Image (tube, grey):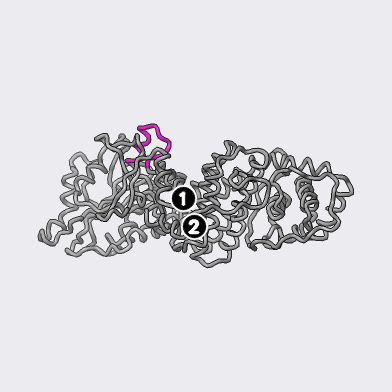
């Protein structure tokens, strides 16, 4: 159940005309009262003798009784209460009781207070009601409406539990503004899947991803085809900006501009500048070891996987303000990955980024600067260009999705611990989209590794089996029973041939994170080993029967992290899921 306190107004009759009217698309059906301050209040919807003017006169009587100088300038209070899409259709009696509870909870008409404000609840659709009230009590005093929006939300949670409705989460004021009904209807008329506000929010979010300066940010907005209007102080300093879609016009044919802050709280110019102010320089990060060039998509993805691995530990164990910065930067990485993804993963990655948008903000103010590695990773992804989705490029995509799944899951746990239910739910939805994107991304590269593992000689496989049982005794049998064991065996063989200590690699890959609930432990370990050993993400250079007798010690891990959760990838890599 979703209550919404609307802006206060001064025209009681105008609001009644809307509530009892046909709606902008004749969507209002059978408008009528379901409850009011007085059981004998006139109902213009069903009583032929009643009129909207009569109802307006009665509602406004306490206001008109005051001297004009004492009347509030904005005396009309408006609350809409909407059921969730999956909720059953409620009766008029049920909606009437909900209305009475809402006016009591918000302070309009407290229970057992005969001097409360006058109000009326109108129903003109199956799934919602509107409550109109005038903000002068019968005794001439003003109602106490402090935190009326929060109190309506709290009452909605109680109503959901008592009526067996879908349990929604109370927000914390950090959510982006929802499209209005007028915006939704306009999008339908124009044949748009989303409203202009939603399209602009995504476009601006992607433009700011990895950007380092105002100039770069505004250049990206222009390249995206948006109309831009800047607000400057008399000194010439830039104060803010607005954006519009070229084909989104008002009735006068003028573009409809939205300020950044109206798109999302973190898209205002001051909040965007916070990201830039924490950047130490304007240069890119150095290339990571490996065969890929510094600016290639695969190199960018490998660096992103490393940054995500480090970020998991910070989100799990770091200071709240620092963790909030890492969570916010994770949204930038997801936006960048979606923007540069191959066709077979693009839809799910875009949905993951859109879902995580809600999880990227919370009431805990982020301290920027600590998150620069993730922001640099987002920049690398953007400047690395679009991925082709095959070979090293496709394998590195699977690797980074794997790491980001765990980072997003860690963010969901962090939000849950902080009591931020909406953000936790959004992060969980993003993780599910990453799960869906991972499957097509990983099938081909892990399938190739699987075939290489199957071709390893029996003595090599026997030695690796013994190594696994000795190094990971609690997980060995589970891994050996998975068809994906062969992909892991191929990776161990390649790491061994490259001079690494396989036992040290395996131990390091599991000690910093619980794996007992993983559906495919071998799948997880493949990417961790290949990243830690700086192996190519795909299957190039895998020896068939070679081992190294005196492997060099592997470098220490760059970070340690702890998290838990089920691993996606229920079947062996390279097999039909």
Q: Quadrant of residue 22?
A: top left
Is the residue under label 2 in contact with that under label 1 (CB below 8 Å)?
no
For the point 81% across and 45% down, which residue is it? 543
In the picture of the structure, the residue carrying the numbered disc 1 is 211
Q: Which mark is residue 281?
A: 2
Task: Say what secondary structure mark 1 lies in.
Answer: loop
Residue 158 is situated, as x and y percent measured from the top left of the image, at 42, 59
Q: How many marks?
A: 2
Observer-nearest of 520 and 148? 520
Residue 526 is situated, as x and y percent measured from the top left of the image, at 72, 50
Q: Which mark is residue 348?
A: none
Give the magenta-colored segment's residue range.
Answer: 182-196
Left or right for 360, reference 138: right
Observer-nearest of 11 and 395? 395
Task: Say what secondary structure mark 2 lies in.
Answer: loop
The reply to whether residue 520 is visible in this rendering is no
């Amino acid at each position: 159940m979703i209550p919404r306190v609307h802006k206060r107004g001064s025209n009681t009759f105008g609001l009644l005309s809307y509530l009892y009217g046909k709606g902008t698309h004749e969507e209002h059906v059978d408008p009528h009262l379901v409850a009011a301050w007085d059981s004998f209040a006139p109902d213009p919807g069903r009583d032929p003798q009643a009129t909207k003017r009569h109802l307006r006169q009665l509602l406004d009587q306490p206001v008109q009784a005051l001297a004009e100088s004492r009347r509030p300038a904005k005396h009309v209070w408006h609350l809409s209460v909407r059921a969730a899409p999956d909720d059953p259709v409620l009766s008029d009696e049920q909606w009437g009781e909900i209305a009475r509870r809402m006016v009591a909870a918000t302070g309009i008409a407290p229970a057992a207070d005969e001097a409360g404000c006058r109000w009326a609840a109108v129903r003109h659709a199956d799934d919602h009601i509107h409550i109109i009230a005038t903000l002068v009590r019968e005794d001439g005093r003003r109602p106490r409406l402090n935190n009326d929006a929060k109190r309506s939300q709290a009452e909605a949670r109680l109503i959901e539990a008592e009526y067996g409705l879908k349990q929604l989460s109370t927000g914390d004021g950090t959510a982006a503004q929802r499209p209005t009904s007028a915006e939704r209807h306009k999008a339908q008329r124009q044949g748009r899947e989303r409203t202009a506000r939603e399209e602009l929010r995504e476009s601006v979010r992607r433009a700011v991803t990895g950007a380092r300066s105002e100039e770069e940010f505004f250049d990206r907005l222009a390249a995206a085809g948006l109309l831009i209007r800047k607000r400057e102080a008399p000194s010439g300093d830039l104060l803010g900006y607005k954006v519009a879609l070229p084909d989104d016009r008002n009735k006068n044919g003028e573009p409809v501009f939205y300020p950044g802050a109206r798109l999302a709280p973190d898209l205002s110019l001051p909040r965007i500048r916070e990201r830039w102010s924490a950047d130490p320089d304007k240069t890119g990060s150095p290339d990571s070891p490996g065969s890929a060039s510094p600016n290639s998509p695969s190199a960018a993805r490998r660096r992103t996987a490393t940054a995500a691995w480090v970020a998991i530990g910070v989100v799990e164990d770091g200071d709240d303000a620092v963790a909030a910065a890492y969570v916010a930067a994770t949204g930038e990485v997801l936006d960048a990955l979606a923007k540069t993804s191959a066709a077979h993963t693009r839809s799910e990655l875009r949905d993951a980024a859109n879902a995580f948008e809600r999880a990227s903000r919370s009431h805990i103010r982020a301290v920027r600067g600590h998150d620069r590695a993730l922001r640099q990773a987002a920049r690398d992804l953007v400047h690395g260009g679009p991925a082709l989705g095959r070979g090293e490029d496709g394998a590195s995509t699977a690797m980074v999705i794997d790491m980001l799944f765990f980072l997003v899951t860690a963010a969901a746990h962090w939000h849950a611990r902080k009591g931020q239910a909406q953000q936790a739910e959004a992060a969980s939805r993003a993780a599910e989209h990453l799960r869906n994107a991972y499957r097509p991304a990983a099938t081909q590269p892990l399938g190739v590794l699987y075939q290489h593992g199957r071709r390893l000689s029996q003595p090599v496989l026997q030695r690796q089996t013994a190594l696994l049982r000795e190094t990971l005794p609690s997980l060995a049998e589970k891994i050996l029973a998975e068809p994906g064991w062969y992909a892991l065996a191929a990776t161990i063989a390649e790491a061994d041939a490259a001079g690494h200590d396989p036992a040290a690699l395996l131990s390091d890959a599991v000690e910093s994170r619980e794996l007992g609930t993983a559906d495919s432990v071998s799948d997880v370990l493949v990417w961790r080993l290949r990243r830690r050993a700086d192996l190519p993400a795909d299957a190039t250079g895998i020896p068939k029967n070679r081992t190294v007798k005196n492997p060099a010690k592997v470098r220490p891990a760059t970070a340690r992290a702890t998290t838990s959760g089920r691993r996606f990838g229920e079947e062996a890599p390279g097999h039909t899921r």
